[in-house]
Image: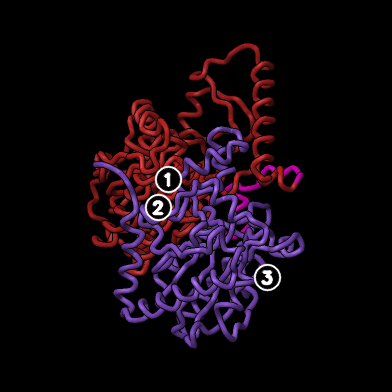
Chain colours: A red, B purple
Amino acid sequence: MLEDLFKMVKDRFNDEKEEQSQAKAPEIPKDLLFKCPRCQSVFYMDEFEKRKKTCPTCNYHARLSAKERLDITADKDSFKPFDENMTSLNPISFPDYEKKIKGMQEATGLNDAVVTGECTIRGYRAVIGIMDSNFMMASMGSVVGEKITRAFEYATEHKLPVILFTASGGARMQEGIISLMQMAKTSGAVKRHSDAGGLYITVLTDPTTGGVTASFASLGDIILAEPKVLVGFAGRRVIQDTIKQKLPDDFQTAEFLLESGFVDAIADRRSMRKTLSNILRLHNYKKIGANWQHG
Amino acid sequence: MSNLTATQHLEIIREKNRPTVNDYIPAIFNHFVEFHGDRHFGDDAAIMAGIATLNSTPVTVIAQVKGRNLDENKKSNFSMPHPEGYRKALRLAYQAEKFHRPVICFVDTPGAFCGVDAEKRGQGEAIAKNIAEFMTLKTPVISVVLGEGGSGGALALAVCDELAMLEHALYSVISPRGFASILWKDPSREKEAADLMKITADDLYSFGVCDKIIPEPVGGAHTDPAQTAENISEYLISAVERLSKLDIPTLLDNRYKKFRKIGVFSE
């Protein structure tokens, strides 16, 4: 029943898209301008890039690749990756899954949807994990689950804080029940890290949904969110068609979550390093060097 | 080993007389007292919880409530819990820990409810918290999937020491309809999805997700609810006895490892 509605909405959405594409006849070169998906304003790409990919009008924080995120977050040359070569197999023999993975790997240069490792941020040591929505919408399968679990286990062992930049469409359906179990596996590792006294900071980025919202993304001691990003459990369109009403524009945004009491603070990307290092300092983590550099 | 396809199992669990927790609880337990509410927002009829005795041992029972008719289903929201349902479950799980009672969860849901209020009250947070807290709950936890175990909404009551499934029960990352709808944009390919997804008790046993398959009478639980209840009861009594013998650190270590080992990758 719900799924029929879902399909209906999807079809309608696709129609809309077609109409839109017919309407805007003169094609805008993709790399010259950026159109904000939140406030629809259009501006020059170099201005957008200069602002670390945030909208000059509404301050929506656009999606970043894991590499871009790492570059603006970690101290220069401080990052040591974990489990770089881990790659998915095909646990439920899903047709063409291997091919899909291979294609994504070639297109993104990533092995799967999360990059984990250790780095310093303004001199403070931390385990860091960054999900990349370019890789199958950063859905969580065995590799995402295992890498995040290992990152927490490493942090527990070495008494390090963990900072995760979350983004995800949810569980990776192509891995069936195995992907659902990653929610339990990761949450278990988060709990052990927490019970050992470790600090875990979640930074919710666009979009964080489904099984990731219903597991480690919601378990941070401190949960930050970038402005205007989408965060939720169920898909907006599924809900919209269930209740037959138009949802308010801010539904499932970072600001909506702040108001509902599920986010500690909205954090601007351009001062994220400062915000994170300050929180680490306030938890008595020690700076390991004054010679950090950035950029 | 059953020779049925996932689609055939699906037909059996959708049989309209298939027993629900309303049938099983009185048949399996004695002295059941139902407790309501999450102490924060409200009471969710999609999850029934309380205490009872199982073969004279006090236990906490937490169950997703599938209705047997439209009225019951309206009341229990077709067994799709809101956040307050999961928070009630967690409240009673903490209480079970305090009073050293084993926890028995019955899973029977297509998934957690998707709606505006559910989002506003933190459906994601409620499920996440249950998953993390059940992982370290210092008392034995046993979950039994009765019919449909769908997605995170099922997992929120299925982080346990032992997971059992009724012979025809299914447990999946998303309902077969949802799967077909998302991957092929065609929910009518539900049956094809069910057969592709590897969601039967046998499949889950082979993945190490399910620890025990509880037999159903020939044709399915509805043909003999009393016999099915007896089979569940027999399993639960042995599981409680088995798990109660372990000291808590061993119990928790085993529970962590049960989930820790699941994942298929190369490196």
Output the chain of dot 1: A
Main SS class of the magenta portion in the image: loop
Q: Nearer the viewer, residue B164 or B109?
A: B164
Q: Is residue A278 magenta?
A: no
Q: The disc labelled 2 sits on which kind of residue?
A: Gln
Task: Tell me the distance, in whole angstroms, between the alpha carbons under discs 3 and 1.
Answer: 32 Å
Q: Point out residue A238 in the picture as x, y percentages from the top left corner.
A: 65, 43
Q: Nearer the viewer, residue B237 or B116?
A: B237
Output the chain of dot 2: A
Q: Which element is circle 3 on? A: loop
Task: Tell me the distance, in whole angstroms, between the alpha carbons under discs 2 and 1.
Answer: 7 Å
Q: The disc labelled 3 sits on which kind of residue?
A: Gly
Circles 2, 1 touching at the beta carbon (< 8 Å): yes
Q: Which residue is mark 2?
A: A182
Q: Which residues are magenta?
A: A244-263
In this view, A137 is above or below B11? above
**Circle nearer the viewer, 3 or 2:** 2
Circles 3, 1 touching at the beta carbon (< 8 Å): no
Which of the image's four quarters has the C terminus of chain B?
top left
Circles 3, 2 touching at the beta carbon (< 8 Å): no
Q: Which residue is mark 3?
A: B42
Q: Is residue B195 visible?
A: yes
Q: Point out residue A62 in the picture as x, y percentages from the top left corner.
A: 51, 36
Give residue A93's quadrant in the image.
top left
Q: Which residue is mark 1?
A: A140
Q: Which element is circle 1 on? A: loop
Q: Is residue A258 magenta?
A: yes
Output the chain of dot 3: B
Q: Is residue A79 left or right of residue B160?
A: left
Disc with the residue nearer the chain's start (2 vs 1): 1
Q: The disc labelled 1 sits on which kind of residue?
A: Met
Does mark 2 fall on the same chain as mark 3?
Answer: no
